[in-house]
Amino acid sequence: MPTSQHLIIAAGRIVLLGGALALVVAPRFIDAGGLTMLTEFLCLLVLALMWNLLAGYADIVTVGQHAFVGVGAYAFYGAAVLLRVDPYLAIAAAAGAAFVIALPAMMIVFRLRAAYLAVGTWVVAEVLMLAAGKLPNFGFGSGVSLPVAVAREFGTRPAERFATIYWLALAVAAAAFLSTWLLLRSRVGLGLTAMRDNEEAAGAMGVNLLRSRIICFLWTAPFLGLAGAIITLQKLRISPAASFSIIDWTVFVIFIVVIGGIGSLEGPILGTILFFVLREHLATLGTWHLIILGTLSIAIILIEPRGLWGLLRKALGGDLIPVSHAARAGFGKPKVP
Amino acid sequence: MTSPAAAPLLTIQGLSVHYEKFRALDGIDITVGAGEIVSIIGANGAGKSSLLKAIVAQAGSRVDGRIIFGDADIRTRATPAIVAAGIALVPEGRRLFATLTVEENLMIGWHTGRRGGLGLAGVFDLFPVLRDKRQQPAGLLSGGQQQMVALGRALLADPRLLLCDEISLGLAPTVVNDLYELLLSINRQGIGILLVEQDIRRSLAVAHRFYCLLEGRISLGGRPDDFDRDTITRHYFGS
Amino acid sequence: MVATYLNLVVQGALLGGLYAIFALGLSLSVGVMRFVNIAHGDFIVLTSFLLLTLSAALKLNVLLVLPLVIPLAFAAGYLLQRLLLQRVIGQNALLPLLVTFGLSIIIQNGLLQGVGADTRTLSAGALDVASLQIGGLNIGVLPLLTFIVAVVLVFGLDWLLYRSRLGAHIRAVTLDVGAADLIGLSSVRVYAIAMGIVGITVAIAACFMGLRMNFDPTSGPSRLLIAFEVVVLGGLGSLRGSLLGGILLGIAQTIGGQIDGAWQTLAGHLVFLTIFLLRPQGLLPRY
C-alpha cells in the first residue's frame, strides 16, 4: 500500500479517536439540548451497530428489532416504577428482559429462512407491541409517563440528569461497539465472514454456523433492551406506539446502516452521523424526510451495496477499524459460477 | 473420417473469458465446419465448460474476442437470441426441470428455438423409450433417459450447431454407446456438433477434428488420426 | 349459541377469502423469484387509492373501474421487476428485501404527502350492504363475492401454472433459473411476466380490500403481515394452501374479535404463531 494511503488511514483513525474523546468530555462543553441530541445519537448508534451485526455479518436480516427496544423500555419501567428497584438495576433488568424474550423469539424465527425470517421478526414485534397494549399497570394502549421521582434518581437537577443519562448512553454505546468488535475478531466473527465469502465452505461448517448465528442474535438483544431503557429515560414515557415504534427503531436504523454501509463497523457510525446531519436539515420536511431517505437507500443499494463507507473504502484502500482480514469481496455481488 | 468441405459454421477468434479474479480462457481460436463433429478435450478446469457457456453468452463477467456464427458476430447477443439463431446447449449435468414432465421439458426446447426440424414426434422417434414416459416428472427417469431428454430438448430447438457438455458423465458404458450412435445420426442430418468430453477415446473416435485445452489455452488441434496417443496425453496434461 | 359460532366461522371463512387474495401475489413472488416483497401491502393500498380516485373521476362503480386498472397493474408489475427488482435479484436475499423495504416507506410517505392521512373506503354502491339469506345465515354479498373471486383466482392461477405454456416456463425458472438461462429461456422475461401477474392479483386485492375495510396510507404493513402469515400457514409454494391459510386466519380473527374487539389482530397473530410452531412447513406444503 502506498505511503499516502497509510497516512490517510492513520489520519482517519485519529479523527475517529478524536471523536470518541470528544464524546467523553462533551457534557462539559455542550448544553442540555445538545446533550439530548447526542444521547439520541448514541442510542441510534447502538441500534445501528446491532442491526449491522446481524444483517451484515450473521446473514440475519431483521425487520423487528424494535421489539427488543420496546421490551427493554417496558421492563425498565416495570422494574423501576412497579417493583421500585434501584434505577440502575432497572436498566440492567431491561437488558435481561430483552435477552429472556429473545430466546423464544429466536426459536420461532430461526425456523424461517432469509426474507421470511425478516418478516417473522416483524410478526413477533407486532405481537409484543399488541400484548404490551393490554398490560394494565403500564397504561394499556396509551401508555404511561415515567414518574419524576424515578427520573430524579439520575440527578436532582436537570443538568445533572442529562449528563448522567448521556454518560449511560455513552457507556452502552462504547460497550456495544467494543464488544461487537471483539466478537467479530473472534472465531465466531471469522467464521461468519468466511461464510459470507464462500458458501461451499459454509456448508461444510454446518452446525458451527448455526451456533454463531444464535450467539449473534442473542448478543444484540440486551443492547437493544438497554437502548430502550435509556430512550425511556429521555422521553420519560412508555407507550406501545412509541416504545415499539417501527419507524424510529427499525426503519431509520435500516436506512442508517444501508446508507452508511452494511458489513463494516465504520458504516453504521458514518450512517448515524449522516442521519443526524440530514435530520437537522430535513426536519421541516416531514414525510419528505422519509421519502428522501428511502430513495437514497435504494440508490445506494443499486450503486454500491456496501454503502457510502464501501465507496470511501475503495478510495482509502483499507479499514479504519480493522476486523481481522481484508475485503469481503463477495458482498452484494452474484457468486462466481 | 474426412471433413466435409464447407463454409465454417462457427468461427471463434481470440476468445478470452474472465471471471472476477481469474481468466478461464485466453486467446482461443476454434472453427466448426458445417456438418462437422468437433471434439474439445481437456482436464477439469481447463476451460471446456466456459467455452461452451461463452458461445451461448452465459459465461463470466467479461468475454473478449469474436464468436462468428453463420455470418454474424454473436458475442454481444443475449442467450435467447443465440438459441433462436440456431445454437443449442445440452448442459453439463443435464439440468432438467425435475418436477416438470418429460414433455414439458422437451417443449421448452421447442419454444426457445427456431420452430422447425424434428418436432416432438421426431424426438420421440429418436428416443422411443421417452414416448411412454412423456407425462412423468423428468426427475424420476434414469440417468440415461434424462440425458436423452436433455438432448431431445436441445434438438427440439432445431439447432444448426449442437453444444454437448460432458454428456457421458455418470452414465453406464452401454448407454454412452447408444448416445454416441445417436450423435452420429444427428450429425448425418447436417447438424454440427461441438463435443466437450473428459472421455478422450470415445470423443476422438467420433470427431472429425479436435482441440485440446490446457489451462485456458489450446495446446493441440487437428484431426484425431494425425496424432498418436502419447502426443495427445502430453498436451492434455501438459509436460 | 351454536348458530352464533357457526355464523362467526362462516364470516371468518369469507374474510379468509380476502386474505387469500392478499396472499396470492406474495406467494407467487416468493415462490418464483424467491424474495419477499416488503412493499406488497403498500402496493395494494396504493392501488386502492388509485381505484378510489378513478372511481370518483369517472363516476363509475369501483367494480367497473377494476377491469380498467388490471392491465395497468400488469404493466406496473412488469416494469417494476424489469427496471428495478431485476437488478437486485440473485443469491443475496438481503438486497431485494432492502429495496422493497425502501419502496414501502416511499409509497407510504408519498401517499401521506399526496392524499393525506385520512382513512378511506371504497364503495360499490348498493352492493355494500346487500346480503343474502343462505341456510338461515345472513351472508353479505360482497364477502361472498370476494370469496368466490378468491377461489376462482386460486384455481385460475393453478391452471395457469400447471396447464399452460407460460406456467411451465414459470415453474422451470422457479426450479432452476441457471438451467433456464443456459438453454435460452429468458428468466428476466419470465420474472417480469410473473410480477405482472402479481400486479393483477394486487389490483384485485386492492378492490376487494377497499370495499371490505378502511384503509389509509399507512395500512400497507398490516396487509403485508396478513399476506405473509397466510402464505406461511398455507405452506410455501402452495396456492391452495393460501386459501386454506386465509380461511383459518379469518376465522381466528373473527372469533377473537367477537371475544374482544381489541383482540382481533392479536388473536390472528397468536393463532399463526401456534400453528407455525406446531407445523412449520405449513398446512399443504408443496416443497
Image (spheres, rainbow, N blue to C red):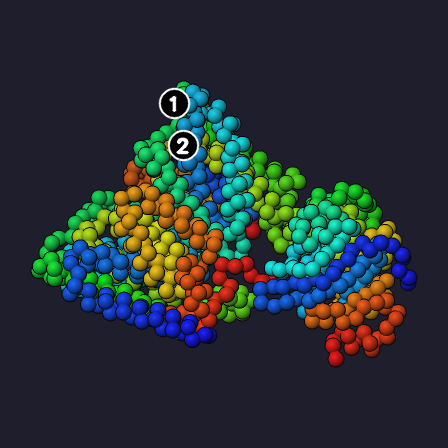
Amino acid at the residue labelled 2: Phe
Q: Is residue B232 left or right of residue B107?
A: right
What residue did someone put label 2 on? C49
- The residue lying at 21 percent from left, 50 percent from top is A238
Instruction: Chain letter for mark 1, please.
Output: C
> How far apart, in angstroms, are the residues tagged by discs 1 and 2?
21 Å
The residue sitting at the left extreme is A156
Return the residue nearer the eye: C235 or C169: C169
- The residue lying at 47 percent from left, 48 percent from top is C36
Task: Please tell me if label 1 and label 2 are on a single chain.
Answer: yes
Which element is circle 2 on?
Answer: helix
Q: Is residue A283 left or right of residue B73?
A: left
* Number of numbered labels in the structure image: 2
Amino acid at the residue labelled 1: Val
Quarter where residue A33 is shown: bottom left
Q: Would residue A319 be seen by someone viewing this image from the given angle? A: yes
Quadrant location of the N terminus of chain C in the rendered image: top left
Which element is circle 1 on?
Answer: loop
- The residue lying at 40 percent from left, 41 percent from top is C107
Residue B187 x, y percent position in the rendering? 85, 54
- The residue lying at 43 percent from left, 70 percent from top is A318
Q: Is residue A224 above or below residue A24?
A: above
Q: Which mark is residue B115?
A: none
Residue B69 x, y percent position in the rendering? 76, 52
What residue did someone put label 1 on? C129
Residue C240 x, y percent position in the rendering? 53, 41
Residue B54 x, y percent position in the rendering? 68, 58
Q: Is residue A199 above or below residue C8?
A: below
Q: Is residue B40 above or below residue A62?
A: below
